[in-house]
């Protein structure tokens, strides 16, 4: 895993100093080597975390034999050996054992059509001197980031916002539409960033920049469900694909382990790892003792049954220092509070290994979230008379006492979340993604006007294939929530510790196979992840398969009333950036402290927003 950056400037000699400034902000992503290469109109920068071929010959930027083409690459190409063998048969010579050199050779052979052959997580940029053109791309599901700015013959790019800003070229005007979407979703969806003039390359897209300007195109999309598939055949095929994906991701020249929460996804991945290596697999988890969010019982059980060398640590909530580091790494407001435990997990894991496999993607691909079951129920719920729902049922749910317990263990919280989602989708059927604030609440809080037609999430939902309401929700999650929240969180928090995280369930072949499955392969009655649980039966203890689901969350609601109360109050009320209505903030805070509402997510969203201008002004 690495950091990439660069500058194309057709009006003058590309500035090596600008790229050096950007590169210096990416050293946490790649502490093993730093390199810059200069062409007359293009400068490329790279920081390296050495995973494959640890020799200096594999450092980047990597240059072609004729010195006319150069690449900077962040990620891993898992099928690089297979591609390399084909290229060698075509006459290509290789001087390293790295996947970076394979990308360079593949571009020389196939140009833009090369992307169809890559199985991996990646963001890369290739400068072609004879063509005076930059070719860049991002992997199919968006594991690796790519930010860019372009104006008047200049193209600037980097793995992270903070790095791109270091060049001091891009204007930093705030995009109010993006700001509004942040408070809706807890993240800012691609292609937007918090800044009007800086963009994210969406997942599954590539682009080119030359003297004619910028072009961006989509090269991959999710396949549609196929209702006539045979269950047994698909189960066997899926198991084979997942096992192959795990084996490919175990290729490493540095120590490797796995995250193990004790859930089905991570336990299945870990079990397959134990069967694919004679060495004892190192596994890692964290604990929240004495809370409804604690999974340590299950991670310990899974580790014992699978025979791993397990390390478990309690979250050290030194919130003041951790909060600042998290704000820095995202570069823009980002409100998923599970970034905190993810940061701590990555920190502890990196002490023993450089690469960790994870179970990310299982919930979105196979129907693991309770909201998918809720959506099934909602289809029937919506058939009830609207007057009865709005005057009797939902007011009764509203009157139930609030709780800060984890929603997976609280019937009351499930009912409240169900009611909110039903109201949201009744008002706007395109609002499939969970929202922290309603549109009206964000308008009052920020004073910003929202244009639904400019919202990338809504645009994506409108392009979904015709299918069932539940599958539509899952497809929306894969293309927005999973990419912009889950994968963004894991990338930034892991790379802050120079830890590479690999996700076998997000192998694009597994993703495509999962998306083709009909709904009843995933949700059978009230059973979630049905086909994945069926596969896991041969690998995972029955207790793990039958256990209740936990999310990777901290007990934020309770902490904001106790150990984090004074710290949060200081940030919320001691200063104002002038963008939020403080009376609204006070009301949200008081309702949470009194127990009338669980406003933990809303408060965290405001806290992260207030931290952003403090550290980025």
Image (cartoon, helix red, strand yellow):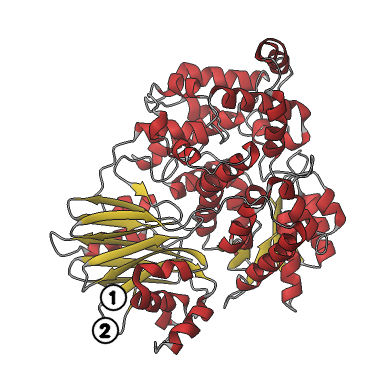
Q: Residue 71 location in percent, x, y?
A: 35, 71
- Count neighbours of disc 2 (C-alpha within 10 A) and say few if under 14, some if 14 to 19, many if 20 or more: few
Check the picture and name the quadrant holding the C terminus. top left
Badge 2 is on which residue? 66
Q: Is residue 277 above or below residue 213?
A: below
Quarter holding residue 591 = top right
* Residues at marks 1 and 2 touching, judged by CB atoms closer than 8 Å: yes
**Residue at the right extreme, as displayed:** 542
Q: Which residue: 17% across, 69% down?
A: 40
- Kindly tell me whether residue 262 is visible in this rendering: no
Q: Residue 465 location in percent, x, y?
A: 54, 44
The foreground one among 509 and 555 is 509
Mark 1: which secondary structure? strand
The foreground one among 337 and 215 is 215
Q: Which residue: 80% across, 44% down?
A: 548
Mark 2: which secondary structure? loop
Q: Is residue 151 above or below residue 86?
A: above
- Kindly tell me whether residue 488 is visible in this rendering: yes
**Residue at the front extreme, as displayed:** 228
Tell me the distance, in whole angstroms, between the alpha carbons under discs 1 and 2.
8 Å
The foreground one among 583 and 536 is 536
- Label number found at residue 69: 1
């Amino acid at each position: 895993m690495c950091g990439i950056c660069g500058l194309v400037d057709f009006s003058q000699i590309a500035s090596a100093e600008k790229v050096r400034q950007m590169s210096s902000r990416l050293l946490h992503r790649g502490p093993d080597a730093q390199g810059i290469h200069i062409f007359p109109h293009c400068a490329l920068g790279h920081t390296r975390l050495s995973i494959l071929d640890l020799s200096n010959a594999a450092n980047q930027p990597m240059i072609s034999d004729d010195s006319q083409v150069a690449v900077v690459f962040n990620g891993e190409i898992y099928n690089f050996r297979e591609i390399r063998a084909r290229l060698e048969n075509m006459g290509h010579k290789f001087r390293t054992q790295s996947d970076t050199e394979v990308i360079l050779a593949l571009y020389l052979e196939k140009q833009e059509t090369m992307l169809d052959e890559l199985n991996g997580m990646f963001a890369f940029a290739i400068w072609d001197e004879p063509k005076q053109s930059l070719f860049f791309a991002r992997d199919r599901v968006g594991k690796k980031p790519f930010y860019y700015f372009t104006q008047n013959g200049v193209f600037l790019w980097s793995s992270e916002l903070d790095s791109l800003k270091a060049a001091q070229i891009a204007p930093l005007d705030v995009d109010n539409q993006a700001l509004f979407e942040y408070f809706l979703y807890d993240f800012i969806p691609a292609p937007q960033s918090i800044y009007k003039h800086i963009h994210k390359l969406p997942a599954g897209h590539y682009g080119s920049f030359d003297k004619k300007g910028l072009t961006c195109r989509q090269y991959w999309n999710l396949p549609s469900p196929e209702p006539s598939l045979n269950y047994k055949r698909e189960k066997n095929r899926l198991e084979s694909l997942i096992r192959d994906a795990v084996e490919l991701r175990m290729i490493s020249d540095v120590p490797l382990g796995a995250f193990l929460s004790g859930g089905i996804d991570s336990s299945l991945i870990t079990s397959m790892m134990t069967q694919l290596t004679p060495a004892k697999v190192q596994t890692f988890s964290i604990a929240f003792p004495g809370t409804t969010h604690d999974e340590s019982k299950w991670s310990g059980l899974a580790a014992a049954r699978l025979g791993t060398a397990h390390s478990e640590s309690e979250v050290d909530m030194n919130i003041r220092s951790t909060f600042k580091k998290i704000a820095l790494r995202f570069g823009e407001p980002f409100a998923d509070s599970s970034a905190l435990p993810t940061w701590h997990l990555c920190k502890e894991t990196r002490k023993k290994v450089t690469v960790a496999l994870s179970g990310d993607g299982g919930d979105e691909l196979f129907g693991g979230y309770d909201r998918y079951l809720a959506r099934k129920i909602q289809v029937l719920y919506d058939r009830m008379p609207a007057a009865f729902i709005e005057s009797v049922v939902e007011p009764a749910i509203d009157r139930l006492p609030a709780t800060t317990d984890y929603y997976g263990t609280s019937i009351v919280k499930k009912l409240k979340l169900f009611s909110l989602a039903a109201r949201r989708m009744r008002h706007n059927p395109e609002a499939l993604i969970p929202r922290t604030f309603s549109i009206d609440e964000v308008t009052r809080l920020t004073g910003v006007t929202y244009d639904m037609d400019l919202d990338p999430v809504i645009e994506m939902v409108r392009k979904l294939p015709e299918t069932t309401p539940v599958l539509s929700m899952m497809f929306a999650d894969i293309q927005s929530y999973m990419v912009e929240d889950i994968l963004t969180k894991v990338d930034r928090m892991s790379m802050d510790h120079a830890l590479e995280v690999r996700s076998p369930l997000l192998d694009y072949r597994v993703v495509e196979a999962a998306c083709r499955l009909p709904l009843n392969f995933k949700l059978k009655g009230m059973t979630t992840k049905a086909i994945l649980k069926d596969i896991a039966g041969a690998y995972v203890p029955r207790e793990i398969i039958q256990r209740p689901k936990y999310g990777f969350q901290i007990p934020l609601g309770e902490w904001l009333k106790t150990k984090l109360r004074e710290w949060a109050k200081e940030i919320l009320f001691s200063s104002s950036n002038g963008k939020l209505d403080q009376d609204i903030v006070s009301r949200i805070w008081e309702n949470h402290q009194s127990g009338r509402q669980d406003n933990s997510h809303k408060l965290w969203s405001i806290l992260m927003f207030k931290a952003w201008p403090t550290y980025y002004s």
